[in-house]
Amino acid sequence: MSQRPDQSASDAAQQQQSSSFAPPAASAARTHLWFEETTVVPQAFRTLLVEYSHILPEEVEEHVIRVRNRAWAVHPYPCLGQFRFLELNLSQRPGDLYARLLSILTATDKNSGTPLFLDVGACLGQDIRKLIYDGAPPATVAGAELSGTFIELGYELFRDSYSSQADILAPLGGEASPLAQFQARLEVVQLGMILHLFSWEEQVTAFKNAISLLKDKNGVLIIGQATGNVDGVETRTLAPRGGDRTTWKHNVQSFQRLVKDVESRTGTRWEVKAELDEGLSVNDGKRSWDDPRTRRLLFEIVRVE
């Protein structure tokens, strides 16, 4: 494993050690340690399904489990196996971030038809529906996913395929990416649980692409969460379809270095807020299959120059 110029020997040793904690390759079998047969739907998500989606209260659990099982058959990820998509993480962020985001979205002209917020890696679109339920005009929010399956099942979960005006786009990649329509138009980009899937260079590219979608002004935001690590390590992760790939799981210090790298390549400057916490089921002991140093990385960076 190569050592980055800005790493110490101990950092490199920690990276080498982290490769032994790579989770097993994903399959749709229901024997995974991260697959739970059933769940109790949290009150906030239950309210969203009952009041936004008009699902009968007594049908909520059955509906959620049915859609989750269909998603799991295609994408057997921990966020699905452990029902973590029910957590509505954006609205649960510490501090006033969610309130500030709603303020940005509700202050716009409702008839402008201009998206201001893009959720990259929207999963089933739960954060987008929560924003709309809480008052954001649907035309001001958009989501993007590599998988059309997530988009289709999101419409099934929330029963809004005929009523939602929010754009939820797929695929993300390729020369004809639909994200091009947002070039220099957005106020906020969320990178939702995707950063840890990429190498350092790929993460730099992700941030550069996000910056290109934001308005060219101070005050625009990139927010998100990712699987992090208390040591900030490069890992070899088994890919769902075989083989492995290099990825980077950050602590606060390594994430700050990443942003500095992005700044040097874009000529922009950003104020960084980042923290590690025990989300992602770390706090309730449900990640026995993972590196015990795993934590959730929450970040918010605002352009200052």
Image (tube, helix red, strand yellow):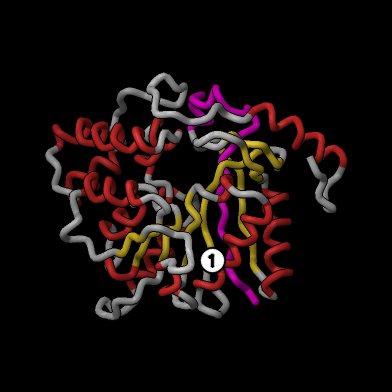
- Percent of width and height locating residue 22: 62, 30
Tell me the residue at 48%/26% (across/down). 284
The C terminus - image quarter: bottom right
Q: Quadrant of residue 32?
A: top left
Q: Amino acid at mark 1?
A: Ala
Q: Quadrant of residue 295?
A: top right
Q: Main secondary structure of the magenta part?
A: loop
Tell me the residue at 41%/74% (across/down). 181
Tell me the residue at 81%/39% (across/down). 12
What range is drawn magenta here?
Answer: 281-305
Asked if residue 150 lies left or right of residue 247, the reply is left
Residue placed furthest toward the right: 9
- Percent of width and height locating residue 229: 65, 38
SS for tag 1? helix
Q: Is residue 284 above or below residue 181?
A: above
Count of residue discs: 1
Q: Along the line of sight, which residue is nearer the eye, 114 or 134?
A: 114
Q: Along the line of sight, which residue is nearer the eye, 261 or 50?
A: 261
Asked if residue 122 lies left or right of residue 246, the reply is left
Q: Along the line of sight, which residue is nearer the eye, 175 or 113?
A: 175
The N terminus - image quarter: top right
- Percent of width and height locating residue 235: 68, 38
Residue behind mark 1: 210
Q: Would you call the spot at circle 1 few (<14 residues within 10 Å), some (14-19), or many (20 or more)?
A: many
Q: Is residue 144 magenta?
A: no
Q: Is residue 175 above or below residue 31?
A: below
- Percent of width and height locating residue 90: 42, 52
Q: Is residue 288 above or below residue 151?
A: above
Tell me the residue at 36%/71% (across/down). 115
